[in-house]
């Protein structure tokens, strides 16, 4: 998995603060200096005033201003299983690599992970799944299930390639590919929606792959909106009441 930022709103936390202050200002906030907009907010410096206001918004559930700044990610090499979970979040925008127009023919049959995401439980004899009381197996069983997994994936990839060679359209041949087949996604999301996604997908009961992806999204978001996502990750992420979309 590899994640990069393609585009993002400049000065996102200034945008958040301007939007929030607009709600209670007699003057429009667009033609005023930012220092003027933030007059009356507690804090010795402008950064302190921004933190005061952003913290107030989060603690009081005033999330509307967080919908204005937006970030666009390139997400590479995740499974179709993850894609199905992620795209349920309809307040984000997605473009997904097409399996109708992209024919997956140039792969190394000896490198299963080139085409398919390998769950860590496949080769970890001590991995415990969500609905398992224990996941421990002996080394021999672990090796056998890893071979079974890899053989099954390899067979499906070879069948796919053979069907395409015999003239079956890639959009139909793809039906034999496993749900772990890698894909690439472009996702655009505003700060509020990203917090909602993280509430659901960075939780302890989320599947390992989407949880890891969400943590990476949050790392990049914290570089972009340090105050907002710093407060969110330290003080909100593990609370019981989840943020509505």
Image: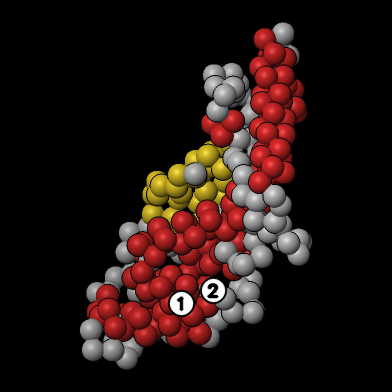
Give the alpha-carbon distance from disc 1 to disc 2, as whole Å. 7 Å
* Dot label at residue 237: 2
Q: Nearer the viewer, residue 132 or 45?
A: 132
In the image, 173: left or right of 103?
right
**Element on which disc 2 rests:** loop
| Residue 87 x/y as whole percent | 64, 50
- Residue position marked by numbered label 1 in the rendering: 234
Reply above or below: 106 against 78. Answer: above
Q: Residue 125, how many percent across, how many down?
A: 65, 51
Are the residues flagged by discs 1 and 2 in contact, CB closer than 8 Å?
yes
Are there few (<14), some (14-19), or many (20+) residues within 10 Å of tag 1? few
Q: Is residue 143 above or below residue 44?
A: above
- Residue 29's image quarter? bottom left
Could you say where residue 5 lies in the image, as x and y percent from the top left? 40, 49
**Residue 136 shows up from this direction:** yes
Dot 2: few (<14), some (14–19), or many (≥20) neighbours within 10 Å? many
| Residue displayed at 71% across by 24% down | 155
Residue at the spot x=54%, y=22% of the render?
A: 108
């Amino acid at each position: 998995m590899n994640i990069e930022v393609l585009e993002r709103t400049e000065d996102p936390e200034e945008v958040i603060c301007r939007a929030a202050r607009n709600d209670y200002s007699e003057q429009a906030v667009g033609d005023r200096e930012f220092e003027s907009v933030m007059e009356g907010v507690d804090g010795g410096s402008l950064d302190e005033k921004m933190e005061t206001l952003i913290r107030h918004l989060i603690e009081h559930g005033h999330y509307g201003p967080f919908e204005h700044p937006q970030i666009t990610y390139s997400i590479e090499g995740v499974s179709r299983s993850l894609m199905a979970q992620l795209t349920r979040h309809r307040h984000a925008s997605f473009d997904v690599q097409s399996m109708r127009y992209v024919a997956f023919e140039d792969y190394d049959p000896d490198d299963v992970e080139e085409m398919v995401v390998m769950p860590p439980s496949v080769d970890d004899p001590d991995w415990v799944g969500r609905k398992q009381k224990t996941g421990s197996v002996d080394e021999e069983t672990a090796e056998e299930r890893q071979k079974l997994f890899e053989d099954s994936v390899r067979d499906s990839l070879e069948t796919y390639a053979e069907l395409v060679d015999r003239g079956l359209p890639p959009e139909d041949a793809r039906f034999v590919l496993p749900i772990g087949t890698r894909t690439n996604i472009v996702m655009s999301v505003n700060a509020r929606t990203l917090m909602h996604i993280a509430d659901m997908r960075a939780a302890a009961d989320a599947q390992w792959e989407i949880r890891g992806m969400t943590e990476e999204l949050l790392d990049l978001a914290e570089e972009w909106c340090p105050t907002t996502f710093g407060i969110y990750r330290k003080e909100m992420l593990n609370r019981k009441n989840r943020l509505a979309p």
